[in-house]
Every structure is written in C-alpha cells, then in structure tokens.
Image (cartoon, helix red, strand yellow):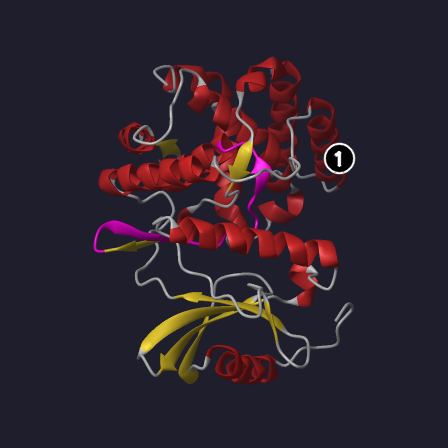
Amino acid sequence: MNGTPEIRIDQVLDEIITSIHMQFGMSVVGTSILTKGWLNVKWRCDIQPDSRSVFVKYYHPDRYKLHLPERRAKIERTLFLQQRLHEQGFTCPRVYEGNGAYIQETPSGFLFAMMDWVQGNVREAGKMSRSDMYDFGQKTGRMHQLLCDEELDASAWHPNQTACLADLQSNLKQARDEQCHPLIELLEQAIHHVEMLDFRIFEESRIGWTHWDLWADNVIVDENKIAGIVDFDRMAVAYPEIDVARAILSGAFDAGGIRVDAVQAFIAGYREHMEVPTGLILRSFKMLYLIESIWWLRTPVLRDTAVPKRFLEEMIWLTQHWDELPYLFSDY
C-alpha cells in the first residue's frame, strides 16, 4: 500500500467490521467516527453480544508506513507494552490480540488495532485542575515505574547540541527568507539559549521507555479522575523526564504562564512512584525545548490555526522566559 491511491474510508470500515467478526466473534452494531488525529482514522464501535464499545484505529499507510517491516514491528512493540501496562493494573485500555499480533489486517491489507473504549472526555489544554494534575502526576509516575522493568530498545534520541543548532539555523534561514520578523527574533533567542546551555546536565538523566506524547488530548478524564492514558504509538526509549515536562506544560500552561500550584500537584502525585531529585523539573523543560523548539518554531506553524498553535505558544513562552525557569522551578 506504499504510494496508495485514494482510500475509501467506507470500504476500510466495512472490511474492519468483517475482520472484527471473523477474528474476535464480535458483531459491530453501530459506529461513530472520531475527529481527532491526522490521516489515521478512529472509530467508536458498539459491539454485541455484550453491549459495550471498543476503540478502533486504522493506520493510514501515509502516516506510519507500516508496509515497512521495521515500522510495523515498532508499533507492535508499543501496543505490546500498552497491553503489559494494562495487565499490571495501569489505567490504559486493553489491546486485543489476534493470531499472535496486536495489529490486525483485513483482506485488502488495511491495518488496524482494537482496544477497549475509555469512557470520559479530555480537558482543554492548560485547564487541568489541581486534583487533575495530582492524579496525572500519579499516573505518569506509576507508568514510568512499571516500564522500568521492561527490556529497553536502542535509544531513539539523545540531547545533541550540534544537531539542534543546525535545525534552528535552518528554521531561522526560512524565517528570514519569508521576512517573518517575530519568528526571526524568537529563533535568534532560541539559538542563544541552546549555545549557552551546558549539556552536561543531561548526564544525570535516566534513559527509559517514554510515552513521548503525554499531552491533554491523550488523557481521558471521567468524574474528576483520570480514567485512562491513551495513544502509545510514539512510545520509544528516550528520557522519561520528557514526559514530565510535556505533561506539566499541557496541563498547567494557561493564559501565558505556568500555574505553579498545578505544577506542585503534579510533582506530589509523581513522587508517589518515582523520585524527583532537585533539578529534574528544570532539566526536563530544557530537554523538551531541545526537541520541540525545532518542531514548532517554524514559519508554517506560525500560520497554522489548529493544534500546533498551542505548542507554538508554549515554545514562545519558554523562549521568552528561559532565564526565569531556574527561579520558577528552584524547589524541584
């Protein structure tokens, strides 16, 4: 399915419904398409005979390129780890296994995964309450604790000053070519921050399995408690503290600033399962900046009005308040 022609989603769904019946003995009696996501298509499917719902995710060939064996094996690995977490009592949905695999394939080669449905909603980014953030921290810490026992793959990313500066310089060139003056100033600041950053601080960072996409849209809240962490597709071996910074920004960055009480609540919850040595939070924000500044401080993102704009706002704030971060997180 590499270089696919236009895909008819109705055909995809029909084949998935048939495969669910053949593979798992379930009859799909109703479907609702879900709007979030890019290229991949997701549905809530009501099933019989037990009158419940499942979540079905179709992997679009242009998104994850699962026709490549190494890409398919990577997603299989993340689904396996999600199921392992579920079996150990972690609040993430069960993944259905068929024929020894978590990725299912229809007769035409459409690839999908099926999981239990998690009832609830997502909070607007930045609007998590103190109790939400405490629970979020607790769940994140428990996830990291459980993943400590899993065998590691090769690390997918390491802090690299030379590579980060090269990407920022490329973004700056594009901004100058397009005379995007607000972005030019931001990128000049970002380059200065990275040039001045002492990369030896990351020598103390623990390498381990990292969710890598731990933001508000992947946290399901029901009746004022977190009912599930979802979307493990980007999971990789890197630095778990990346998750800490991403979670804090997603839940506590609001109206142009960080809600310190929400940060404190998250850390209190996280500490129930994992240590938070002094300097970890500040270091985690600097590590996240190395990854995400090169993604979001770009002229195409500046013109975008969808989800990336939120991440752009976060990176702008970090760029402009870089020198204040040590004081903001001095107690952690």
Where does residue 21 sit, x and y in percent of width and height?
49, 83
Q: Which residues are magenta?
A: 223-240
Asked whether residue 255 appears in the rendered view, the answer is: no
Asked whether residue 164 appears in the rendered view, the answer is: yes
Seen in the picture, residue 181 relative to 204 is either above or below; the reply is below
Amino acid tagged 1? Ser
Where does residue 109 sit, x and y in percent of width and height?
68, 75
User: Residue 1 versus residue 24: which sits nearer the camera?
Assistant: 24
User: Residue 279 versus residue 183: which sits nearer the camera?
Assistant: 279
In the picture of the structure, the residue carrying the numbered disc 1 is: 170
Q: Magenta stretch: residue 227 in it?
A: yes
Report the side of 191 relative to 129 (left or right): right
Secondary structure beneath label 1: helix
Where does residue 236 sit, x and y in percent of width and height?
58, 42
Where does residue 6 sit, x and y in percent of width and height?
70, 77
- Residue plotted at (52% across, 47% down): 309
Q: Magenta stretch: residue 244 in it?
A: no
Quadrant of the frame with the N terminus: bottom right
